[in-house]
Amino acid sequence: MVMVMSSRGWTEGSLWSDRGEHNSTQCGRFECFQCGNVYRWKGNLMAHLRVECGKEPNQHCPYCPQRFKHKSHLKRHFLRLHPEHRWPNK
């Protein structure tokens, strides 16, 4: 269960529809019960729970101690703060 913001205030909601199907297209205010992050789309909350929440960053910058949960964030950091180096094309 997750806390969902509706016109009546915060209510307890489910990440699944009444028919047992994944409901990722529903729009609203969906808050992660573990960390409090808020998402507009239920599918984004589902992805957050599956990939990100409660996990340590596993992307490491080779030139400083920065760590990231997403490779795209590492690349953005790398290109902005370490322009003297080339981003590895793998």
Image (tube, rainbow, N blue to C red):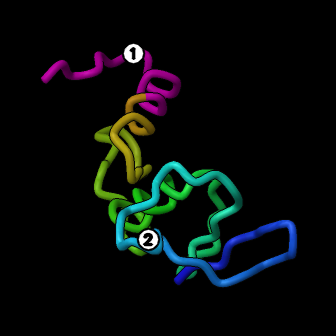
Q: Decide which of 5, 90 is in the foreground and name it.
A: 5
Is label 2 in a helix, a strand or a loop?
loop
Give the image location of residue 69, x and y in percent. 39, 53
Q: Decide which of 7, 76 is in the foreground and name it.
A: 7
Task: Assign the magenta stretch its main secondary structure.
Answer: loop
Magenta-drawn stretch contains 86: yes
Give the image location of residue 14, x and y in percent. 52, 77
Is label 1 in a helix, a strand or a loop?
loop
Mark 1: which amino acid? Glu
Which residue is under mark 2?
Answer: 16
Report the number of numbered marks. 2
Against 46, residue 66 (above or below) is above
Q: Decide which of 24, 73 is in the foreground and name it.
A: 24
Label 1 environment density (alpha carbons within 10 Å; few <14, some 14–19, many ≥20): few
Q: Residue furthest front?
A: 19
Residue visible at 46% across and 74% down in the picture:
18
Residue visible at 57% across and 81% down in the picture:
33
Quarter assignment of residue 23: bottom left
Residue range of the region highlighted in magenta in the rendering: 76-90
Q: Is residue 71 left or right of residue 29?
A: left
Against 21, residue 74 (above or below) is above
Residue visible at 38% across and 46% down in the picture:
70
Alpha carbon distance from label 2 to label 1: 48 Å
Q: Are marks 2 and 1 in contact (CB under 8 Å)?
A: no
**Of circles 2 and 1, which is in front?**
2
Q: Decide which of 61, 3 is in the foreground and name it.
A: 3
Q: Quadrant of the C terminus?
A: top left
Which residue is under mark 1?
Answer: 84
